[in-house]
Image: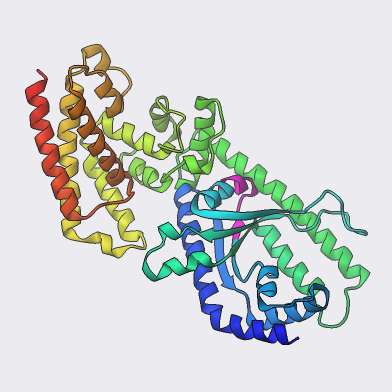
Amino acid sequence: MEIVDQFIARYSKEYDFYSRAAQLVTQALERDLKESGVRCIVTYRAKDITRLEEKCRQRAPKKKYKTVEDIYEDIVDLAGVRIALYFPAEQDQVEKAVNRLFDLTEKKSFPESNRRSTGKEFSGYSATHYRVRLKERELIGPDTRYAKARVEVQVASVLMHAWSEVEHDLAYKPLSGDLSDAEKKILDQLNGLVIAGEMSLRMLQEASENRVARSGRFLNHYELAAYLLNQAGKILNEPVGDSGLGRVDLLFNFLSELKKEAPADLDPYLESLHDNVEKRPLSEQVIDTLLAEDPSRYEKFNLVRLHAVEDSLDPHSLSSRLHQEIGRFLTRWVELEEYLRNLLPQEESTRTVLPISRVLDRLPSLDTETRHDIDLLRRLRNNLVHGRNVPSPGYLASASDRLEEIIERVRRILP
């Protein structure tokens, strides 16, 4: 047992390291899933030292640990994150978020086979566990060291998580001997109720989506996310996952500002969706179409975006100069966009609102260099509007100056 003592002594010193790694994974998942409209509870922990020691001493005779590293390799959940889903059907969306946000090293699904344990009527614990590492390139400063930590992410329904807690504590940590046959049967019956409850949750989710589609208005961005996924799947003739949704929360708040809160209000803006949702998420496509239809909406959207920034975890992005430079750049961009759209033939300008990239394709007299410059600034505009990689105020000031030069150049080149 000396190896176990050495391991526990070392882990005690590293407890905060594993807790922080789990916290970073939780923050990334919680923010991403909330923005995408996935309803869930996300919690984290580093493994309790006392319970860990008990587990190691129980496993040591069978595992025959020879080194401390053997124990680290054997115990995979020193840092753990739990995602309890309100609706089990959103499991696939969580998996795409896990793959997008982290380096996935292993995936394990439960139950591991269709065979049931002797004396049980139901399948038992149903969940998916992911072993992940934080992406070092996306960590800043001292946090880069947490990329070395292996974190286990457990995903199941809220009902299944509750049942597994009860079952685990009773079956694996009994206070007075092994469970009786009666206790085992009751746990099995509860498992059956949980499985039935999950079926009911799936039916509830479907009924809610049908209610919104028939008549009502979107009460929150979760309902908007479900409707957007459903409609986009029909339009694009293929299912769209969570990674293709984008910032549904921003879209919902923007639609609320515009008083477009019903499915019928949204449908016209879904007609021009394209299927490259990994590059241009659905929410961003709809927001861009709304802005292109009426550039005066930029002001309202900027307010929506600023409120979202104020609620984010990055208060340093709230400098008044940054907001001033964002406003200046977007004002110039609207000016350029309106000018280019007015150059389109009348029959083109009255069709479905075109993205600016397609507007440029319909202006063959525009030289290659100008097209390239506009395209670079278009990417910056997308980052600003959708809250990705916002640059410094100084960079934005230079970009606004460049945009003013391009506006003058376009006016000289085109009639």
Which residue is pictured at 25% across the width and 37% down the height?
376
Residue 12 shown left or right of residue 407 in the figure: right
Viewer-proximal residue, 74 or 358?
A: 74
Give the vertical position of 161 relative to 215 (above or below). Answer: below
Q: Pick out the residue farthest to the front.
A: 66
Q: Residue at x 30, y 45 (%)?
A: 383
- Measured as percent of width and height from the top left, residue 283 is found at 41, 39
Could you tell me how many numbered marks the image carries?
0
Location of the C terminus (image quadrant)? top left
What sort of colour scheme is used for the picture?
rainbow
Q: Is residue 195 visible?
A: yes
Q: Where is residue 363 shown, x and y percent of the image?
A: 22, 18
Q: Nearer the viewer, residue 57 or 302?
A: 57
Q: Where does the image place residue 412, in percent across and percent down from the top left?
A: 6, 24
Position above or below: 141 against 4 = above
Q: Is residue 309 left or right of residue 363?
A: right
Q: Quadrant of residue 362?
A: top left
Magenta residues span: 83-93
Q: Quadrant of the N terminus?
A: bottom right
> Depth check: 297 or 101 in front?
101
Foreground of the two, 217 or 268: 268
User: Which residue shows up at 80% across the image and 57% down it?
Assistant: 124
Q: Is residue 260 visible?
A: no
The answer to whether residue 127 is magenta is: no
Q: x, y (%) of residue 96?
A: 55, 46
Q: Is residue 206 above or below residue 414?
A: below
